[in-house]
Amino acid sequence: MANQIADNAAYLPHDEAVAMVAAHLRSFWAPSMRERLTAYVDEGGEGLGPLARAALDSLR
């Protein structure tokens, strides 16, 4: 789902897209969802796109 959110922001300049995706994750995802995504990335995060990963990293 994070990749789909990132896909919707891909038309923006990179920094704006990262901020938009991060804002969405912060506003609409429960903390437990963000924690699971963080754990997934810490285990390698296979399949998570670079924009979604950058947005998550900005929330750490």
Image (cartoon, rainbow, N blue to C red):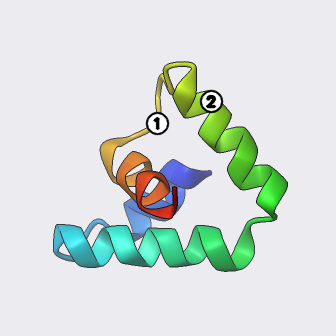
Residues at marks 2 and 1, CA–CA distance in whole angstroms:
9 Å
Kindly identify the residue that appears in the image at 42 percent across and 69 percent down: 8
Q: Amino acid at mark 1?
A: Leu
Q: Position of residue 51 (x, y in %)?
A: 34, 53
Res 24 → quadrant: bottom right
Label 2 with label 1: CB-CB less than 8 Å: yes
Q: Nearer the viewer, residue 23 or 60?
A: 60
Q: Position of residue 46 (x, y in %)?
A: 48, 22
Taking the view exactly as shown, the residue that stands out farthest to the left is: 13
Res 6 → quadrant: bottom left
Q: Position of residue 4 (x, y in %)?
A: 51, 56
Query: Which dot marks residue 40?
Result: 2
| Number of numbered discs overlaid on the protein picture | 2
Query: Which dot marks residue 48?
Result: 1
Mark 2, secondary structure of its residue: helix
Q: Pointer 2: residues within 10 angstroms few (<14), some, or many (20+)?
A: few
